[in-house]
Image (cartoon, rainbow, N blue to C red):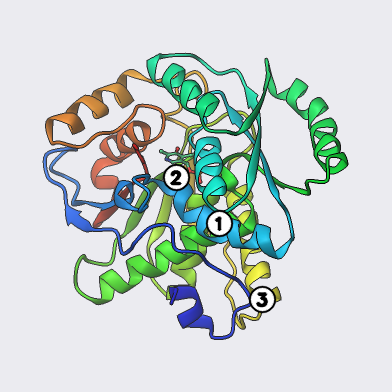
Amino acid sequence: MTHLADRFGSLRLEHVALGSGPTPVRRLDGLVGADVELWVKDESRFGDGGWGGNKVRKLEWIIPEAGRRRASTLFTVGGIGTHWGLACALYGAEHGLRTVLGLVDQPVDDHVREQLGRLERSGAQLHRYPDVRRLKLAAPWLIARNIRAGRLPWYLPAGGSNPVGTLGYVETALEIAGQVEAGLLPEPASVVAPIGSGGTAAGLALGFRIAGLRTRVLGAVVNDAFPLDAPVIAALANRTADLLEQRGARGVPRVTAEDLTTRDDWLGSTYGDPTPASTAMVERAAGLGLELEPVYTGKALAAVEDLGAGLAGPVLWLNTHGPR
Ligand SMILES: Cc1ncc(COP(=O)(O)O)c(C=O)c1O
């Protein structure tokens, strides 16, 4: 049973287990300055198909909801190195769903090149565009084409950050609350995660309110393609709270922009661009046996390093990277 079903009783929301939680939490010394009591929750270990990371958490709710909507196709968008698009293609196929991807060019490095190769081999239908404007112009045509072919597509925004996908991180916040209650870690003053499309941060913020924890979400914004400030994240959290109530939950609290902090100080020049600080963090983490990447996890850790003692209390960093 999920923590959400346990908390709210008769929820009309289905869940399919793609990974096994709870993901482990542990103290992590030597990665950032000694002025921070750093803990890690290792989301890279979530996902029984060998995948980890935050997409799997979102797909656990999205895949059954697609069935409820009688959709046979997931239509989603991302950069040409999208981890989210690949996870949709692979997990969707395992559950009888086709994936159509609208891909936008992004800075290319070895990782992005390899990722594009995986997308090409994934079985998803790929459509490439030089920029977001042209993708937006083409999207209605892509949707209409699938409908004409008798395949009802469900449009999922970049990163799967709609209210259904966001449930994955409400569930994770409740999992963290359970680990705090079990004495596996102290109640974190802050939980730190990157913000690429917002669902992870929004779900955590709502989940901590539901669980009654005082933990604040600190999101390091790593994407400049659309607004991802605290009011935007709070609005997504509250649309997720609305969804829970529409599906039978009662008394779901709401999130305000003051409940979380979002900052783009570690973004660098644009989305997908490694910074010297994020690259240094990836190298330091490798020395401790942790495999990270510089676009999300490295930037979130650079935030922890910079804010240091200002974070005032135990910090739980989510390792959202999910290598396969
Ligand atoms: C490794 C990793 N961490 C964090 C994120 C950000 O999560 P979200 O899109 O929910 O903001 C993503 C994807 O966008 C990701 O691939």
3 and 1 marks in contact (CB < 8 Å): no
In the rendered image, the quadrant that contains the N terminus is bottom left
Q: Which mark is residue 191?
A: none
Residue drawn 37% across and 63% down?
215
Q: Is mark 2 within 8 Å of ligand 1?
A: yes
The residues tagged by marks 3 and 1 sit, at their Cα atoms, a distance apart of 14 Å
Q: Position of residue 142 (x, y in %)?
A: 79, 32
Q: Nearer the viewer, residue 226 or 262?
A: 226
Residue 213: quarter of image? bottom left
Taking the image as shown, residue 3 lies to the left or right of residue 135, namely left
Kindly tell me whether residue 312 is visible in this rendering: no
Q: Is mark 1 within 8 Å of ligand 1?
A: yes
3 and 2 marks in contact (CB < 8 Å): no
In the rendered image, the quadrant that contains the C terminus is top left
Q: Position of residue 171 (x, y in %)?
A: 45, 66
Name the element at disc 3: helix
Q: Which mark is residue 245?
A: 3
Q: Give neighbour class at mark 2: few <14, some 14-19, many 20+ (Cα, 10 Å).
A: many
Identify the residue under disc 2. Answer: 219
Give the label, 1 or 2, closer to the camera: 1
Kindly tell me whether residue 98 is visible in this rendering: yes
The residues tagged by marks 1 and 2 sit, at their Cα atoms, a distance apart of 15 Å
Q: Nearer the viewer, residue 131 or 19?
A: 19
Identify the residue under disc 1. Answer: 166
Q: Position of residue 20 (x, y in %)?
A: 34, 61
Q: Position of residue 164 (x, y in %)?
A: 61, 59
Q: Amino acid at mark 2?
A: Gly
